[in-house]
Image (tube, helix red, strand yellow):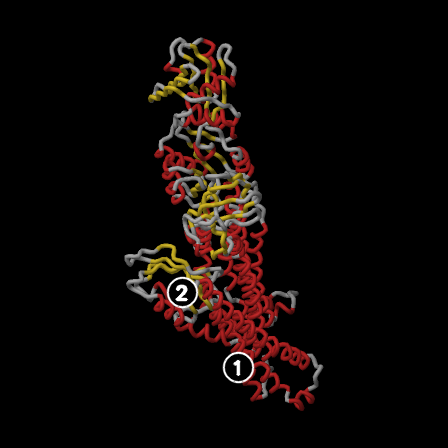
Amino acid sequence: MADTETTDTDPSGGAQDLELPVIGMHCANCARAVERALAKKHEGVSSATVNYAAENVRVVYDPARVRLEQLADSVRDAGYRLVLPEPGADGEDAETVARKREQAAEKRALLAGLVFTIPLFLLSMAHDWGAISPAAADRVGLKFLLFLLATPVQFYTGRGFYTGAWHSLKSGAANMDVLVALGSTTAYLYSVVVLFTGAGHMYFETAALIITLIKLGKWMEVRAKGRAGSAIRDLMKRVPATARVVGEDGEPLEVPLHAVGPGDLVLVRPGETIPLDGVVEKGGSSVDASMLTGESTPVEAGPGAELFGGTMNIQGALTVRVTRAGSDSAVARIIARVKQAQGSKAPIQRLADRVAAVFVPVIVSVALVTLAVWWIFSGSFEASLVRLVAVLVIACPCAMGLATPTAIITGMGSGAKAGVLFRDAEAVEVGARLRVVAFDKTGTLTRGRPELRTIVPAGNTPGTELLKLSAWTLYNSSHPLAQAVVRAAKERGIEYGETAMFDERAGFGVKAMLDNGKLIRVGKPEEFENVPAELRADVERLRERGETVSLVSDRYQLLGALGFADMPRDEAKQAVAELKRMGLRTAMLSGDHRRIAELVGHDLGVDEVRGELLPGDKEDAVVAFREQARGAVAVVGDGINDAPALARSDLGIAVGGGTDVAIESAGVTLPGDDLRGVPRAIRLSRHTVRVIRQNLFWAFFYNVALVPVAAGVLMLVPGSPAALQQLHPAFAAAAMAFSSVTVVFNSLRLNRITLD
């Protein structure tokens, strides 16, 4: 589905970026014709990129210099239709109506072709095989009957090929319509000449079969291509059309989704889909966010929790205050990003585009040479003409045009459902040839906030008492280490009172007078005097384990030590192990102390660890990894300091909790924080590129192998099958149609791949 959307608008009159549906394209050369009609005929158009498989064009234009109506006129002159958004209507509705009309017209043409072609074929075969005697044929006027049956097929069912060929030639680019029109018309006109002269064999059934079989193949192709974008349509269907807005009287009222705005309160009952992005005001539940993150485990949602439209409320009722609506919602942004990426072109497609640009003229030349050579050596113009028609028909470059975009559309759609968003098709291709994956540490491999990991009591102080006094003292501090202590006490259900005095100084730590009379101090070990040797040994032991240490004292008596660490994410070790099983080398880049970085890296099984790095050092490390591995390098990060390394890498991967700078620098974004999305993304890239290569191989192999067969090369090979030595144009048409359908169905396999 390719609805109309504005992705970049400057209200002052700057460039606008629109994605618009195109009706009537049949092959890659059609796509090139639309691009030329937009980009080369209008100075106000910065770029025009057509996605043949998705049947849309992404155009960047200046509305002050060119109007949309002018663009539509240029596309119509080229033989196609640009669907513009109708005033006051949804662009999707305009496209849906246009596509339904086109499909209905194509279906009528196909049915007419079948109605006339089937009896035409049966009568022709019966006559050729002797089932109808010449005398009986003359009595019923069989030749004229065949002519009458073939003519509607030629000029009604085949009308689109003629109009397409005319517009194509007029715009200076020959497309597949030219080949089909030339091939079928040659067979039809030759048969008309034979009909009125009586000399030779008629090929009315051949002309009709060519048109009808290709129409049938295109109809099957369109139906199959519709499934390629099913993932995006599934995402859209996840968002309900209405929401229950809580009124001032506290009663919920069901209203259309477009009427709900930021600040409104929305009631979401158990089992319902959350309609819009928002924050929980009241209630508690479990929420299935797999459609955004790819993670199937439900997450707990209570007051203050951020929720996203399209996710599923599993248990309790929730009252949600809307924060973002419409095109600003997370689902809308994901859909826009995926559709934009699906419309981009992968570098691997450039070869197919270059071949398609010269393919039709080359094939016409080959067909004419075939006609001349066989006419000279066989002496039969009729037999030579049949070979010319077979060459023209079998060589249509549809499969080449579909090879890459259908795989990209399907692969990116599968990625969106698995919580993997690619920026463009090039990112997919790069992901398939990665050799090294380098992770940032803090906030990426780790949770990004310190946790209380170790409690070491001194003397007779119980561990629970040490934690209680520490949390009591640090309750009013905003320092990350203080908050880690408070969280740990809360998780253990420890309660404490108020503080009579609170003093916090940088470097010194925190000192507080508790309402039980104790004067507790928490700070760095270096700030304490007369630390016992046993406690000093504990401090060094904790630091050797990569922990940050604080001491706790009551006036002059040391009560113990607290060890803090930025703990690895639960799934980090599994993600690293999976990447290594895939044959990739893993690395960790960190600004932390080298010893701490090495301990975390060793715990996670990372192959190479580099610590004490500045942002520029991380960038240099990426270059070094690329030279060592002699291949592409990916960097996984989440912060501003990761942006240089993400930009320098061959593929940047930003986790969902990262900054906008990191996400803009990345080729892949993981909306959730689950690092298992990294191997998913790479595995999806490999699958997608493998399918593209298979498609391109079969598309090229098909033409390289079968064009010579149609030209009659196998006549020179003794023992080769007679059906291939004299390839009938009808079989050539069926083979051409089959090749396109095969490429599309091969791409659709990406909907069924397992990424975990």
Q: Quadrant of residue 44?
A: bottom left
Quadrant holding the C terminus: top right
Query: Where residue 179 sits in the image (x, y, percent)?
Result: 49, 71
Q: Is residue 616 above or below residue 320?
A: above
Query: Where residue 624 sits in the image (x, y, percent)?
Result: 40, 35
Residue sitting at the far bottom: 139
Q: Residue at x 43, y 41 (%)?
A: 654
Q: Quadrant of residue 222?
A: bottom right
Q: Amino acid at mark 1?
A: Leu
For label 1, the residue is: 189
Q: Which mark is residue 417?
A: none
Cα separation between marks 1 and 2: 50 Å
Determine the secondary structure under disc 1. helix
Query: Where residue 415 sits in the image (x, y, percent)?
Result: 51, 48
Q: Is residue 69 above or below residue 259?
A: below
Q: Classify 10 Å Cα crowding around label 2: few (below 14), some (14-19), many (20 and above).
A: few
Q: Is residue 207 above or below residue 270?
A: below
Foreground pick, 522 / 152:
522
Q: Which mark is residue 88?
A: 2
